[in-house]
Amino acid sequence: MSCNWGTELWDQFDNLEKHTSWGIDFLERYSKFVKERADIELSYAKQIRSLSKKYHPKRSREDESRYTWCLAFSATLRQLNELSDQREELAENLNTQIVCELTRYTQEVKAERKTVSTLHYIYKRRFERDCKEAERAQQVSDRIDLDNKTDGEKVRNSSPYTIYSHYLNLFSQRIQDMEERRIERICESMRSSAEAERKVVPVVSSCLDVMMDAAEGIQPRMVSAVGGVVEVYKSGFDPPGDVEFDDYSASMRRSISESSYLDNRMEGRRHSRKLWPFIRKNKPPPPPPTSPLPGGVANSPQSLAPASREPIAQRLNDLMTSGSRTRKQCLRSLKRGCSGPADCSHLPPEQRRKKLQTRINNINQEIQREREQRDALLKMREVYEQNPQMGDADSLEPRLEEVKQSLQRQEEDPDGSYTEDHSAELQFKSRSSEFDDDFEDEEPLPSIGTCKSLYPFQGQNEGTLSLVEGELLSVVEEDKGDGWTRVRRNLEEEGYVPTSYIKVFLDSSAKGAMTYI
């Protein structure tokens, strides 16, 4: 149904003016709404991006690549960053396509409405003036003859008809057109807003799908099994067995031969190497307490007591407080306890194997890259030799020689790029040897007693001395609580042996009595 405001509302121009003013206010309100929504979308995008950066790890840990839940969370953070980009794009589209256009169109509507109102005011004043002239003409026509009175009425009616039928109808029609265009522009703005929202929906849906796939990829059983925690923290040691002990209450009822007893002791030592994975590797584990010795004297409580928990600190203290004669042995004992981390000896066997395998893989990758670079340089040099206009082949020689030396160095060095620890260790050994040379000319320490080895011992570490069962040695230094005693063989060989492996006889002048350790 179409209506013409010029014919239907010819006498309601004031109401039409109020209606158009309200329509312009609504247009401004809608523009402000879209602008505030764009600001909210932009603020939301910034907060989402800030949240994603906040919880994204600054440095990637090695463990995070193993666990599926860490990978899923990283994927979620990346998709949140993508969602923030889409929200920023939506805010930009709302500002450029809707807010700016509505602001410009609002100014145009206001200007057009002002023009129509001004023209309406002008023609209204003209109509009032014409009405006054018509009244004066009416007074004049009353004095004229009756025949001329009809013609005067026709002229009098033609003037209002022209005003009402043409000018006022034109103004009302222009207001109607302006109102229809305003409503149509609001419709287009709402449609554009929904279309801008719809454009980002596929990308948002794709991001949500990736988040769902990442969540579905979490495998709790796989993480807790071989692929996760077990692979990271497995030490490779066997579970500890039963702790061996001597039942002294049943010693009178047992009759054990010497040979079977020694066989059991050897077997116990083999098991003890697996029982205690946390004992320092540079010291062999002591055997279980020995049986009562002949003569009715039981083992001393010193042999049953655990080793000191701070032997290194004690030796450092001895190094600082002792004289020059004993500094050499303190330094040697410290060197026995040191182990550099370059060979991963501080790690359990399984973790050590993985670390070393990772180093081997990295070194192989470096070697492969160097070889590929060398092959590329050789091929380029061959091309330059065949086509001199492409380049000078001699210019590649310095770089080629550098690559060859680097490749040779990596292939010959067993530690690859891990040479700093090795050099530090050599430097430490050289300094220690220089320190030891200062005391080479000093007299050896006097013997304070003798000892007899109860079990064989293989001294594989520096500063230790191998033993044969039943061997007689001289005691140079007593056990200071760390489980090691310093002995000498033939005035030439000195070293430390486990206190529990020997039976010590101290001189009366040194100790005043015989002691069993």
Image (spheres, rainbow, N blue to C red):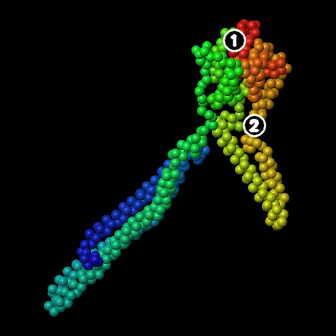
| Residue farthest toward the bottom in the current orientation of the protein | 147
Dot 1 corresponds to which residue? 294
Q: Quadrant of the C terminus?
A: top right
The tag earlier along the polypeptide, 1 or 2, is: 1
Res. 423 visible in picture: yes
Q: Count neighbours of disc 1 (C-alpha within 10 A) and say few if under 14, some if 14 to 19, many if 20 or more.
A: few
Q: How many marks?
A: 2
Where's residue 366, x and y in %?
72, 49
Q: Which one is in front, 93 or 403? A: 403
Where's residue 433, x and y in %?
80, 28
Give the label on residue 422, or none.
Answer: 2
Name the residue rendered at 67%, 9% in the picture.
296
The amino acid beneath tag 2 is His
Question: On screen, 506 above or below 175?
Answer: above
Answer left or right for 460 relative to 8. right
Q: Count neighbours of disc 2 (C-alpha within 10 A) and say few if under 14, some if 14 to 19, many if 20 or more.
A: some
Name the residue rendered at 81%, 27% in the picture.
434
Quarter location, residue 259 = top right
Secondary element at tag 2: helix
Question: On screen, 71 above or below 140?
Answer: above
The amino acid beneath tag 1 is Pro
Q: Which one is in front, 275 or 131? A: 275
Secondary element at tag 1: loop
Answer left or right for 330 relative to 302. right
Question: On screen, 270 above or below 213?
Answer: above
Quarter location, residue 426 = top right
Where's residue 381, x and y in %?
81, 60
Name the residue rendered at 81%, 57% in the picture.
396
Where's residue 184, x and y in %?
37, 71
Give the label on residue 230, or none.
Answer: none
